[in-house]
Image (tube, rainbow, N blue to C red):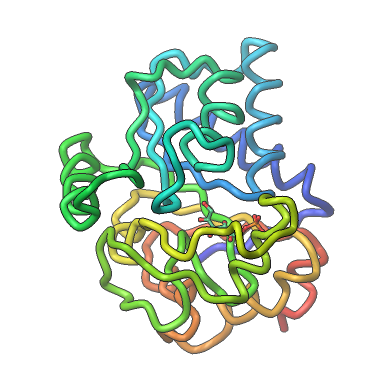
Amino acid sequence: MEVVIVEDAAKGGALVAQAIARLLAGRPDALIGVATGSTPVPVYEALAALARRGEADLSRARVAQLDEYVGLPPGHPESYRSVLARQVLEPLGVPEGSFLGPDGTAGDIRAACEAYDRALAAAGGVDLQLLGIGTDGHIGFNEPCSSLTSRTRIKTLTERTRADNARFFGHDVGQVPRHVITQGVGTILEARHVVLLATGEAKAEAVAATVEGPLSARCPSSALQLHPHATVVADEAAASRLE
Ligand code: F6R
């Protein structure tokens, strides 16, 4: 695992955006796995700036969603599909047909999860998976004690994660869905390159456990220690508990 420490979130976003642009320069139809939440926003902004300057071309890129809330009505502004349309597809000019995601509104969620894993494999697998990290060490929504070989499936969010995400739902934790579909830890590890971006002091403990802690399902992000090409990009605050 390589660890890159940057000054702040903007520098981290720029660095990851450049890595994505380089990948696309060599492989224009690369499949980029994208996360939601606050952390990746500077990446998407930096990528949009590169695209405007003609230094990144996403016209043939394919994009795959990491996770999704279960039960939000189609088109809900906080469904991750809607968030990614606003933050990635529209600003970066990625055609809707190049987007892969799990169906959080499906009647048969289990079948939808299995279908998504099949769709990722049929697309040739993810070339670069961008991840954020939860304060409890979750990646995707693989909460602590998730199997490190898990596949895409339905998970129940912990109260800590629901509280962390309440800011997207008018600070009303009661509005945060209880269930999500998430790529499993095993699914995430199949990406050819995994890039975890962590910013802010609140992530410092989770980053230390990811990089220096024991490999343990109690900290699902520690599974990245097993990956042959994993990069952790942390700003100084998020890296502050590394030894
Ligand atoms: C979101 C996701 C989550 C977030 C994590 C951190 O798609 O997979 O693992 O990356 O909850 O969220 P932020 O970046 O909002 O702190």
Nearest the viewer among 175 and 131 is 175
In the image, residue 156 above or below residue 36: below
Q: Is residue 143 left or right of residue 228?
A: right
Q: Give the image quarter of residue 184.
A: bottom left
Image location of residue 183, percent across then percent down: 34, 56
| Nearest the eye: 121 or 23 | 121
Q: Quadrant of the C terminus?
A: bottom right
Residue 113 coordinates in the image, percent (x, y): 24, 53
Residue at 33% of width from left, 44% of height from top? 105
Query: How many numbered marks are there?
Result: 0
Percent position (x, y) of residue 106? Answer: 26, 45
Residue at screen point 27% across, 69% down: 150
Task: Tell me what residue is drawn at x 78 percent, y 62 percent.
Answer: 200
Q: Residue at x 63, y 27 (%)?
A: 47
Residue 103 against residue 54 in the figure, above or below: below
Ligand 1 found in image quarter: bottom right
